[in-house]
Image: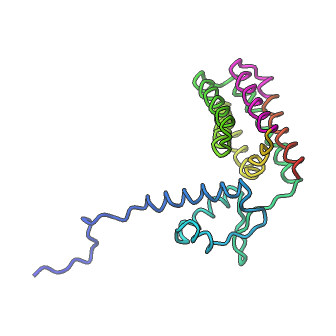
């Protein structure tokens, strides 16, 4: 008579972790959008029970999402208090934007010199898509493409230290950048600024691209300050 083996039956399929991972990503995206759109306000406490009911999920993927958003700087995990939406002062936002403007100005200068022809074409194509998302008043898609353009410019600069320094700061003002284009006039102007940046970049005008990139960020800051 054969003895029952204490070893796990390797013939049995292992639990597939992809489903849970995909669920956590979906919750992260939805929560991020709620924060960016202002459905969850700065300083507001995250009510986990309410969100699990709203999303129809358990607390495990929700808490995974909260950790991701905390790493992005959108949430703050406070011991014994729970999770709250990060609250920033006007002064802190201004400081971060001023440094980001300098970094993006440098990125524009380097990208105009170092970008490959494929880099230039990709940024041109994304800028056209940006215009279409604006004309369709599709703000979430616009914001995603906008971020992709800035990432592409940073990558095209060919300076990894610059990319890392920018990433450390960019998460801290993600919500502020989203809120910057809430008025129709500012949104239209932002699209036109991106088109001017793409044109200067295609012409490999390093000085002009740098100036336009820096000015673009500072105008966002001005728009944010006017809303305060």
Total tally of numbered discs in the picture: 0
The scheme the figure's colours follow is: rainbow
Q: Whole-percent x and y of residue 60?
A: 53, 70
Q: Whole-percent x and y of residue 145?
A: 64, 39
Q: Residue at x 75, y 25 (%)?
A: 196
Q: Residue at x 71, y 78 (%)?
A: 80
**Lateral position of residue 90 relative to residue 111, left or right:** right
Question: Residue lying farthest top?
Answer: 203
**Lateral position of residue 13 relative to residue 116, left or right:** left
Residue nearer the viewer, 5 or 92? 92
Residue nearer the viewer, 93 or 40? 40
Q: Main secondary structure of the magenta part?
A: helix
Specify the segment rendered in magenta.
185-210
Q: Whole-percent x and y of residue 40?
A: 72, 62
Quadrant in which residue 75 is drawn? bottom right
Magenta stretch holds residue 168: no
Q: Is residue 186 above or below residue 49?
A: above
Residue nearer the viewer, 21 or 222? 222
Q: Quadrant of the N terminus?
A: bottom left
**Lateral position of residue 174 relative to residue 22, left or right:** right
Q: Residue at x 72, y 71 (%)?
A: 78
Quadrant in which residue 30 is drawn? bottom right
State whether residue 154 appears in this view. Answer: no
Question: Residue lying farthest left?
Answer: 1
Q: Residue at x 82, y 41 (%)?
A: 220
State whether residue 48 appears in this view. Answer: yes
Magenta stretch holds residue 205: yes
Q: Whole-percent x and y of residue 169?
A: 75, 48
């Amino acid at each position: 008579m054969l003895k029952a083996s204490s070893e796990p039956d390797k013939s049995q399929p292992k639990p597939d972790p992809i489903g849970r991972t995909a669920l956590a990503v979906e919750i992260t995206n939805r929560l991020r959008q709620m924060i960016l759109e202002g459905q969850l306000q700065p300083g507001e406490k995250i009510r986990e029970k309410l969100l699990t009911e709203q999303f129809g999920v358990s607390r495990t993927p929700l808490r995974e999402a909260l950790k991701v958003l905390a790493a992005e700087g959108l949430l703050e995990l406070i011991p014994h208090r729970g999770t709250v939406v990060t609250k920033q002062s006007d002064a802190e936002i201004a400081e971060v934007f001023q440094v980001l403007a300098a970094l993006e100005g440098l990125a524009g200068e380097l990208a105009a010199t170092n970008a490959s022809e494929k880099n230039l074409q990709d940024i041109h194509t994304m800028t056209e898509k940006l215009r279409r998302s604006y004309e369709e008043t599709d703000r979430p898609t616009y914001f995603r493409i906008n971020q992709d353009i800035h990432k592409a410019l940073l990558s095209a600069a060919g300076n990894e230290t610059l990319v890392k320094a920018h990433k450390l700061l960019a998460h801290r003002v993600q919500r502020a950048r989203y809120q910057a284009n809430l008025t129709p006039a500012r949104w239209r102007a932002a699209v036109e600024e991106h088109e001017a940046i793409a044109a200067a970049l295609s012409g490999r005008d390093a000085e002009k691209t740098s100036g336009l990139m820096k000015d673009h960020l500072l105008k966002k800051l001005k728009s944010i300050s006017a809303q305060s």
